[in-house]
Each structure stands twice: as structure tokens, then as C-alpha cells.
Image (cartoon, helix red, strand yellow):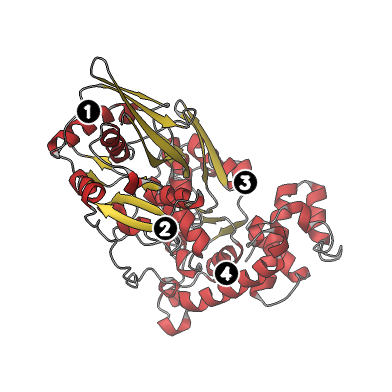
Amino acid sequence: MSYAKVLCVGLVGVTGHLVEVEADLAAGLPAVVISGLPDTALHEARDRVRAAVVNSGQRWPNRRITLNLLPATLPKFGSAFDLAIAAALLGGSGELPLLPLEGVVVLGELGLDGTVRPVRGVLPMVAAAAQAGVARVIVPVGNAAEAAVIPGVRVRAVDTLHRLVAFVRDGTPLIEPPADIPAPAVGGPDLADVAGQQLGRRALEVAAAGGHHVALLGPPGAGKTMLAERLPSILPELDDDAALEVTALHSVAGLLPPGGRLLRRPPFQAPHHTATVPSLVGGGSGLARPGAVSLAHRGVLFLDEAPEFSKGALEALRQPLEHGQIQLSRSGGGTVYPARTQLVLAANPCPCAKPAGDAHCECSPLVRRRYLGKLSGPLLDRIDVQVRLMPVRAAELMATDGDVEPSATVAARVMAARQAAAARWADLGRRLNAEVEGPHLRRPPWRLPARVTAELRGRLDSGSLSARGFDRVIRMAWTIADLDGRDRPDQDDVREALQLRTGEAT
């Protein structure tokens, strides 16, 4: 037999596509040709696979070898095709009867000594195989736990090419995935640690309940960073669909923690202010990798000292904040990554960060305006909650723990509010108030009475509030009503939402 075929999966972003790895061995000068839009890593597979086959005790066929990866129009990236290529080669040369691999997806990178090494993106690969109707996959032993979280797929693992050959040729059992061990409880920052700042705590609770973006402005030591770091502690755990999305993104980025479990806690990303545009939104040669805004999908992206970020990096966030995804085009092709995150900005009032009334402040009014002016109007227009925090007072700092609500208490209210919103917007396919499109809020049956929105409409007519801001205030009003257990916002809810939006709350 001079022809063989083995199934594999190729990734474009986080989307997997079933790939057929074909091998044809013909008479002629010994050579290996790979077709099907392979990248550099895949072109180099010919040398890795040859060394792995020989060092595993198998005979290398000295013939003209043509490898084709179908569909040929789909770009192929990475080294996950190595194991499938080796199996197809050995099958085409007559060394292996490939019947045991019929309808089986084979994934893995080969070392020169024949070891099978883990690869990135196994979880979305296995998910794509399951969606295509494949019920069995073979993965590297280091990826077995990760692959096993996909339901309805029988996962087996290999550590060497020799083990795969023994399975195909003699029926030697492959390695079973490790037993699923419950993840240990992980403690984290608690809202009880934050002294005072009732306005900041209220803003954080509203943001968590509705999925709203937040900007925290104030002097050093006011608690901006402490509040931002505690936002994940009041967010509900991710459901199955969201957990799969988040885990797949971290798998593609190679950042999945050991153990291969689904990530149930909302992710928290806090890049340094020297972060570049590609590190924030995604980039890299060939096909772009996910950036911090995608790794924070369904979680929190915290930009501390926001005015210190480059203007280009901040402005690059405008599109993903609006649409919940980011489309990246590179020389190797284009891809779309989800980016539905909660953005939290923290900023001091000026570069020297001393209180405005301090005689030692080195910043003129013009310098102050320019400093905060780095946060452009279009970017801030996308930030729902914008509050100014005052310095903490001595009485608040010395308060006992019993005077402050812990994260668990706030999280219970947030969960109840989110459940109410999910039930209300179920027909629209939305779960959070921040996800609801403005036209739905301005039309019956969700349009609020004129008396409730009178002040808001006055701001819109005067030009002090944009149309986008109008919609965002209405969304926050719905969130405030959900937190208070009411089925519709009233005038006070709209007024509080407007105060949170404009930073006028006291």
C-alpha cells in the first residue's frame, strides 16, 4: 500500500477544523514534499518525523513522499500534526495497518527521540473533533487531562511514537487520562480588606451585577487597586459554555494551569503600563495569538495607572469593548478572538499624584488636564461607571472587620441580580444588562416612562451626554433595580446611574 490517511485538527485562532493528513509514497528520488498551506513549523516536520521514526526503531521509507493536508485552502499552523504525519507515513509504507486509527483524531508534536510532546490548543481541537462527529482522539500524555473535559469523546494518550506503533500493530493499550480531581479551594483578596470607600464599593457591585466597565479616579492610597483586584471575588463562577471559551483561549495561548481542568473562576489580567498594542489586543508573526483583552474574556482586564499606557494601546481597546470580540489580520491570515471583558481603569489625578490642595503639588492645572486627557473622550464614553474616590479617613481605616461586608455577601446580591437580568433578556439571547443593545431599551416593552428619563433626556439634548452614554445609563439603571429587587427602574435608579456615569456621585 502506498497511500494512507490519518485525521488531525488544525486551529485558526480558537476555531478548530478537521484536517485529513494524506501520505503518498511513490517511486523516485527520496524526498519529502508537504502541501496544504503549511507554516514554517509544519515545513520542519519532515526532519522531526524522520528522526523520530528512525529513533523509534521503525524503517524510514526511501521513496518520494508527498504529504497533503486537506482542506488545502485552510492555513495550517504549529507542530500538532507531527504524530499524524508519522502514522500516515508508516501506514503508507506498509509498516502499520491503520485500521485501528480509522475515525480517530491523532494530535501531538514529536521530539527527535520519538517522544510525544504536549501542544497548545488541544482543548479547542478536541472540541472541534467532537463537533465534527469524531468520538475518539489520541493526544500527548501531557494534554490528556485537558482533552478529557470535552464530553462525548473517548480520550487516550501516548508518551512516545513507539507506544502508538505498539497500539496499532499489537493492540497494546494506550494511557488512560488521569482521574478528575476536584480543584482545591483557592482563596483570594476579599472586599472586607477595603477600608471605607462606600462609593467605590457600590460602583464595584453595580459593575459586577451588570457587566459594566469601571474607571476609578483618585489620589494614591485611596483604594483604587484594592477595589479592582477584588472585583473577581464578587463575580459568579463561569458556567459550562463560558468556562470552555475561557479555557480554550488559555490553551491556545499556552497558559493553561497544570491539571487540565476547566477554568471556573473569571480570569483577571493586569498588564504593566509598558504593555504594547499587540500584547493587549493580540499579535505575533504568522497567525496572531490572543492578547490580554482576550485572555480576560468573561473576566476582568485591569489597567492600573491607565494614563501611563501608550495612547495607541488605550485606543486599540475601543473596538473590542464595543463589540465583545477582536478581529486580527496578519500575514499568516485573519482570526477572531472573543473579548467580552470588564475593563477597569485606575488613574491618579496628576503625574505627581499629590492631593490637589497640597502646596507641594508640582502640577499646574494644564498639566492635570493633559494627564487625564490621555484617557480620550471616545474611550471614556465606553466606560459605564466613572467615580472619583476620596482619601480614606482615619475612622474608616481603623474600623473593625465586622463593619465591612465581605465579598461573599456582595457576591450573593450580584448573583441574584444577574439571574434576574438573564431571565428578562433570555428571548434576546443576552445574559447581562451591559450586553443588551440600545434599541431594545428604547422600544416597548422595555422603554422607560418619560418622567423616569426626563433628566437623562435633558442631558442628551444639551450635549452633555452622548447617545452611547444615554444607553449605558439606562443599562446601569436596570442593574441598580435588579440589585434592589425591583422589576423596573424608577427615577431614583436612573439618577444614581447618571451620577455613577458622570462621576458626580457624592
Q: Amino acid at mark 3?
A: Glu
Q: Earlier in the sequence, mark 3 or mark 1?
A: 1
N-terminal-most mark, 4 or 1: 1
Q: Is residue 481 left or right of residue 460?
A: left
Q: Return the residue at label 3.
A: 322
Earlier-in-chain disc, 3 versus 4: 4
Question: Along the polypeptide, which appears first: circle 2 or circle 4?
Answer: 2
Residue at 42% of width from left, 58% of height from top? 153
Residue 64 horizontal/vertical position (percent): 27, 20
Q: Does label 2 or label 3 sit earlier along the sequence? A: 2
Residue 194 is drawn in which quadrant?
bottom left
Where is mark 1, residue-wise?
Answer: 47
Residues at circles 3 and 1 in contact by the CB criterion of under 8 Å = no
In the displayed structure, 330 sits above or below 301; it is above
What is the spatial separation of the Cα atoms under label 3 and label 1, in whole angstroms? 46 Å
Residue drawn where x is 83% and y is 57% of the image: 443
**In this view, the mark in front (2 or 4):** 2
Give the mark, 2 or 1, whose residue is nearer the N terminus: 1
Residue found at the very far right of the displayed protein: 450
Tell me what residue is drawn at x 72 percent, y 69 percent. 493
Q: Position of residue 185 (x, y in %)?
A: 34, 73
Q: Which mark is residue 202?
A: 4
Left or right of residue 431: residue 219: left
Q: Is residue 290 visible?
A: yes
